[in-house]
Structure formats: C-alpha cells, structure tokens
Image (tube, rainbow, N blue to C red):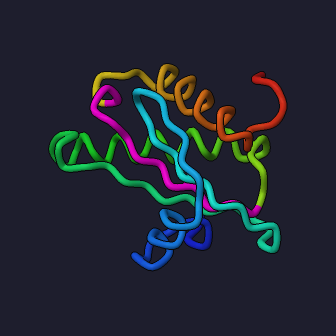
Amino acid sequence: MNELMRLRKNEEFQLVFKQGKSFANRQFVVYVLKNAERKYSRLGLSVSKKMGNAVMRNRIKRLIKEIFRELGDRLEAGNDYIVISRKPVRTMEYSDMKDSLEHVLKKAGVLKGRRC
C-alpha cells in the first residue's frame, strides 16, 4: 500500500469521523466516507494501546493492511476507510479477522463480488 493510499493527518481522520458513516461488529468499527471524485481508496487505522504492546499493535495493523490489499479489487474505489479494532482482535487468527472485516464492509455496502 503506497503512501497516497493512507490517511495520516488528524484533519483527514476528523473529516471521515464527522462526515462518514460507521458500521460495526464485535471486532471492528469501520467509518466510510464516500468520494466519487477520487480514483483510489484511502485507509486509516486506529489500534488502541489497550490492545497490547507495540509488537501486538503493529501486528494487528499489518494484518488489516494485508486484508485491505487482498480485498482491493472488490472495494468501491474513491472511499476513505477508517478501521478501529476492538479487544477480541488480539486473539484472532488472520482468516477470522478477514471474515469479520468482510462482514463489516458488506454491512457498509462497499464490498462487491464474491469471495474466491
């Protein structure tokens, strides 16, 4: 995921929080802000210190980025996504995280096509 595809600035996060819509399950909260003018989607991640030490938080972020990379062609282009992880994610395997994140994205109506 290159640098243009990441949300990093506080102002960008606040815009998505204020103007976007949120969707959640027990493991993730996803905020989506639709933007038809942009040709690429951007991803922002929030993993609290309550999730564990830096190694655990970085592992969770790495797995979420990989899931979004895999789902890239099935996601609507041009949207901003913020993914907030909740405590159950700490003990989840990659496949469970992917299923859970797909579930939330389907709820949001931004995931198209079927799983391969």
Point 41% across, 27% down: residue: 26
Which of the 4 image quarters holds residue 16? bottom right
Quadrant of the rendering where the N terminus is positioned: bottom right
Query: How many numbered tags mark residues here?
Result: 0
Quadrant of the rendering where the C terminus is positioned: top right
Which of the 4 image quarters holds residue 36? bottom right
Point 48% across, 59% down: residue: 44
The answer to if 85 sits in the magenta stretch is yes
Point 41% across, 47% down: residue: 84
Asked if residue 17 can be seen in this view, the reply is yes
| Front-most of residues 100 and 56 | 100
User: Is 74 situated above or below 94?
Assistant: below
Asked if residue 1 can be seen in this view, the reply is no
| Front-most of residues 74 and 27 | 27
Left or right position of 21 against 86: right
Residue 33 spot, x, y in % from top left:
64, 61
Left or right position of 47 against 29: left
Residue 70 spot, x, y in % from top left:
66, 39
* Image: magenta residue range: 78-89
Residue 65 spot, x, y in % from top left:
51, 47
Point 71% across, 61% down: residue: 34
User: Is 72 situated above or below 7?
Assistant: above
The answer to if 100 sits in the magenta stretch is no
